[in-house]
Amino acid sequence: MSFPDPTETFRQEARELLEQLELGLLDLEQNPANDDLINSTFRALHTIKGSGAMFGFTAVAAFVHEFETAFDQVRKGNSPATSELIAVALDAKDHIHKLIEQPDAPQAGGEAILDALRIAIAGTDVVDAPTEVETPEPVAAPAKGNRWRIRFRLPPDALVYGTNPLLLLDEIKAIGPCTILALTDTIPPLDTIDPEVPYMGWQVDLTADDPRAAIDDVFLFLKDGMELSVEPLSEVEIAAPAPAEAQPEPVAAPEPKPVAAPAKATKAPKAPKPVVEKEPPASAAASSSMRVDAERLDELMDRVGELVIAQARLTQIAAMSSDGNLKTIAEELERLSSGLRDTTMGIRMVPIGTLFSRFRRLVHDLSRDLDKDIDFITSGEDTELDKTMIERLADPLVHLIRNSVDHGLEPAEKRLAAGKSAKGTVRLSAVYAGAEVAISVTDDGAGLNAERIRAKAEEAGLLAPDAKIADQDLWQMIFAPGFSTAKEVTSLSGRGVGMDVVKRTIDGLRGSIDVATTPGSGSTMTLRLPLTLAIIDGMLVRVGNGRYTIPLAAVEECVELPEGIEANARGRNFLDIRGSLVPFLRLREVFGTRAPADPHQKVVIVSSGEGRVGLVVDQIIGNNQTVIKQLSKLHSSIKSFSGATILGDGTVALILDTAHLVQFGQGYVDQGRAA
């Protein structure tokens, strides 16, 4: 049995914490007075520091400690969270990422980042910054301060999560002079000790003016599950510590608290129980999710796919049998396999918000580099998409957003001259559209320049000089390899590579790209993608002697083809569906089927985005669970099909690409009208 590498586990958790830190800093830039954001950012830093030290990443712990010390001034309200501070903090976050991912590689620039961070926080030179951070020490040092007694017991799971009590005591020592006494009254017999449970408590008599805020900082991440009391000592108690060092008993039971102390002592073995009773909900919440390798999920999906195929075969055999028991078992297995399929699919589906959150930093940096004030707005983060698609969509969306910011949004002076706000807007949204998810990148910039695109296309030989072309086809030219209308090559654009990457990736995901633009008002790039790449509900139809599957999520309704419509009624291939004209395609003509047509043909109305088309078939066989199998590279150029599936009888049925057929149907009707 192989165990996960603890170092890799730390890296995975650190990536999530760094992502949380980045989002917190970006939110803090928009809302610098939000205490919750400041505290969540500080907690992320504190957790990274503690985990880094526990797993041996000493460079990470040391750097984050300095980062945390400087950022603590923001948490205490001594320094505002300015844009300059956030920019340096983001650079510090990137440096932490490098230290974690490449611990053995030389990492220069850390001190420079910390110096810049101190300057941004203190507003003075670097030399003054450490002095400001160190000032609490002389305040806590005077012996003439008040005396306080701190008692604490850690939560039962503190050691499991890497808490070191000695480090906590060191932090308390830094507040002021103190004497420390270990409380051993709850330690059980040796043979029942659990090494992961902190049985020992601590009593600290501290000299300081008012240490309660500092003590809260020490136990910031432990307060919910621990016992903690901070109380001032009376004159009698102040005189008591001298004999207490030689005889601990008087200290354990001081005169002002004769009732409270003995109560804890006599019921000491039961003292942790209230804490333990409160812990299970938190523990259950913490263990409600677990990490699973993506390969295992893919393997599970393959097994479920094979089960669905076997279940379909059993259902078909049961339908031809008169055995009632067999029919009952087939129905039960169908119900169970359907539930297992939905559960497995749910595991693979991921909210697209996990992807959208990555681009806030991208827009933030582009705004700074290009000196453009940009408002980045996202919507539809709860829309779920197959995890495989989420992973492969990152690069295309990066290119689309960079293109919108660099080419789409004009400089502030041009926007003001055009009557727009100086601040540009980029919107990233996702919505369900039938069997697809539509992801749109919209900007309120200048829009696409048709003349420049056409000139560049003619120059590249993609378009004849006098050729007539529809606007939609012209916009698609920007996705050609090497195509760019940029006048000069910069670090952001000009080589014509980015949009080509977008096109190839989306085609590989069986998706499509729609382009809409209004001169002077902006552009919208919409990626239309299937919800999943694995298993779908399908409608099985027959055209001639062939059987085909239509994704059920794309089907709106089924109607019978009216009598009297000629087979070659070019230009009149429309159906009146409740007052709306819907073009239809005879799949017999599209697929070149020679078998005679059935006398009563059916029309399946499917949709993709805003478009609808009717597909004329000979027979609707029924619904089934469809396991999508990818077509070979030899058949990848056939656009009418998105894959294939194995039916219950072992034969193969092709899966129709509804998005392509809707687009093809509109062009087919237009062609018929022109004939």
Image: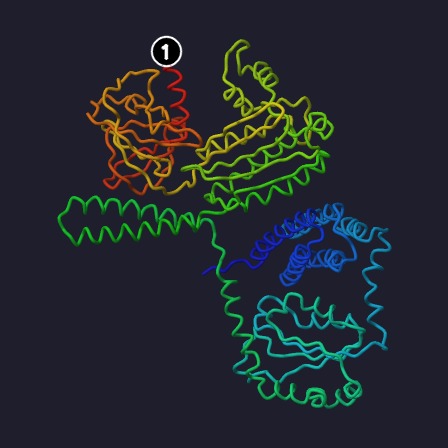
* Residue marked by disc 1: 675
Image-quadrant location for residue 76: bottom right
Q: Residue at x 63, y 83 (%)?
A: 184
The x, y position of residue 89, in whole percent, is 72, 49
Q: Residue at x 33, y 20 (%)?
A: 573
Instruction: Tell me the element at label 1.
Output: loop
The vertical placement of 556 against 79, above or below, is above
The vertical placement of 658 against 431, above or below, is above
The x, y position of residue 268, in whole percent, is 58, 84
The x, y position of residue 494, in whole percent, is 64, 26
Q: On the rendered structure, is 61 left or right of 189?
A: right
Q: Residue at x 73, y 68 (%)?
A: 213
What amino acid type should be assigned to the residue bearing mark 1? Ala
Q: Residue furthest top?
A: 466
The x, y position of residue 528, in whole percent, is 47, 34
Q: On the rendered structure, is 273 left or right of 174?
A: left
The vertical placement of 609 against 458, above or below, is below
Q: On the rendered structure, is 34 left or right of 502?
A: right
- From the image, which quarter does the C terminus lie in? top left
Q: Residue furthest left?
A: 322
Looking at the image, what colour scheme do you see? rainbow
> Between 605 and 450, which is closer to the camera in this rendering?
605
Image-quadrant location for residue 524: top right
Within-10-Å neighbours for mark 1: few <14, some 14–19, many 20+:
few
Q: On the rendered structure, is 631 left or right of 14?
A: left
